[in-house]
Amino acid sequence: MDFDAWVADLTAGTATHESGFVLQVEGDPRDPSAINPANFPANLSFIDQARLMRCGLEFLAKASQNSPTTYSSATGATDIESLKSEATKEREALAKQFAERADKPERSVLSLKRNK
């Protein structure tokens, strides 16, 4: 198994191995606050699972060093839309489609404001 065959999607915070293993991090990829591994390859020992996860974290941290950590629309240097993967754009479009349905039921609004 090639432990260095990874693809990173920094906007989603994921690293995907060629075996199908997906590693998702929350927070800064160089110092994540949470790690969510999924789809470990079958018949992989615990030691190799740990190695695969460590290699994925290292790959994601290195990939994030080459990209900007902050985005500023005032400078125009980095457009956040251009950094999103096609899969992310498709998921956002699908979510928007369901959020803006014409047949969406009307629901009462819960408010914590007091009427005076």
Image (cartoon, rainbow, N blue to C red):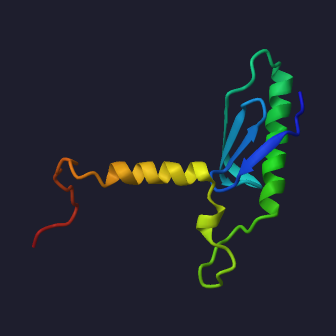
Q: Horizontal placement of 8 versus 81: left or right?
A: right
In this rendering, is residue 74 above or below 81? below
Side of 111 where 79 appears, left or right: right
Give how far across and how far down residue 30 sits, in percent.
Answer: 77, 55
Picture coordinates of residue 116, whole percent (x, y):
9, 73
Q: Which residue appears at 60% of the width and 84% of the height?
A: 74
Q: In the image, is 101 to the left or to the right of 35?
A: left
Q: Quadrant of residue 43?
A: top right
Which quadrant: the N terminus? top right
Identify the residue at horizontal 65%, vertical 62% (top origin): 83
Where residue 90 appears, as percent x and y from the top left, is 52, 50
Identify the residue at image location x=21%, y=55%: 110
Which residue is nearer to you in this view: 107 or 5? 5
Asked which quadrant contains residue 50, the reply is top right
| Residue plotted at (80% across, 56% down) | 63
Label count reads 0
| Residue farthest along the top direction in this orientation | 43
Q: Residue furthest left?
A: 116
Looking at the image, the residue that sits furthest to the bottom is 74
Q: Is residue 84 left or right of residue 107?
A: right
Q: Which x, y percent locates residue 3?
A: 88, 34
